[in-house]
Amino acid sequence: MGQKANPIGNRLGIIRGWESNWYGSKKDFAVKLIEDNKIRTYLNARINKGGISKIVIERTLGKLIVTIHTSKPGIIIGKGGGEVDRIKEELKKLTGKEDVQINILEIRRPELDAMIVADTIARQIENRINYKRAIKMSIASALRMGAEGIKVKVSGRLGGAEIARSEEIKQGRVPLHTFRMDIDYANVFALTVYGKIGIKVWICKGEVLAKRDLNPNFVGGKSDVSDRRDHRSEGDHRPRRDDRRGGGDRRGGGRGDRRG
């Protein structure tokens, strides 16, 4: 099941929250659902270079609240907030609602966000950068920032080959069957001159043992993986590799000193 279901949908209600928060009756549920899809499609096309990770939509008493999670808030806000005001007016025309609020949340570690990583790889492939190099750079960045594991799969006419194929590169652990594992997932297309190339990214950010706030705008806990590059537990006093001397350092004396 872990290999077939979407890792985000699989964890809804356990360690992840819904990206659309509202109640709809039988009459208006379909209308609101289609409107959410229109808003997301429009914003992703309107701000295609804004580093958008996800768009959270909330509805309360006739008020529409759109929260944009992005790694480049300056592009969306614009000079003196002029750009975000224009987007707000455009959303009012699109939805026909007068009370529209836009919130912008900055993603401080874009290397750990699957959507941004997949989008970065797609843009590099579109710019004719070797796909293996682009993937390996993204994997190295994610592991450097503290991810426990990352898996990237690309499919299509890789490198402009005549026959389409799939390649997968994985480092670390990505246990898809463990529901308490915080795994981020994204699926993006790269539009090249020789056809579409599909990119899938799975990033494992660690295990969630405590109860988590399911609000999709919640930032904290295990989702912000702490930098564990040089952190050891208090009881771990083992020397680092560069502190080990003696047997491996034969500059002063080696086998020649044992002769007599």
Image: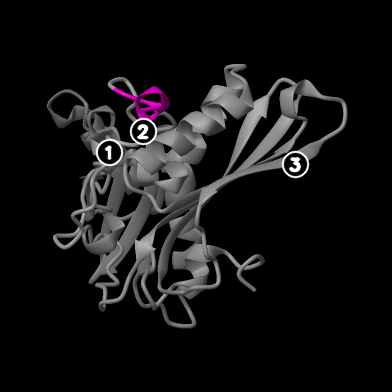
Label ID, residue 244: 1
The kind of residue on which mark 1 rests is Arg
The kind of residue on which mark 3 rests is Ser
Furthest-top residue in this view: 128
Which residue lies at the image location 40% right of the left edge and 27% below the top edge? 259
Which residue lies at the image location 22% right of the left edge and 56% below the top edge? 99
Which residue lies at the image location 27% right of the left edge and 68% below the top edge? 215
Q: Nearer the viewer, residue 231 or 43?
A: 231
Please tell me whether residue 258 belongs to the stretch shown in magenta: yes
Q: Quadrant of residue 91?
A: top left
Cα gap from disc 3 to disc 1, whole angstroms: 43 Å
**In the displayed structure, would residue 260 be above or below residue 4?**
above
* Contact flag, marks 2 and 3 (Cβ < 8 Å): no
Q: How many residues crowd around disc 3 within 10 Å: few (fewer than 14), some, or many (20 or more)?
A: few
Q: Which element is circle 3 on?
A: strand
Q: Which residues are magenta?
A: 253-260
* Contact flag, marks 1 and 2 (Cβ < 8 Å): yes
Cα gap from disc 1 to disc 2, whole angstroms: 8 Å
Q: Which element is circle 2 on?
A: loop
The kind of residue on which mark 2 rests is Gly
Q: Nearer the viewer, residue 9 or 165?
A: 165
Residue 84 in view here? yes
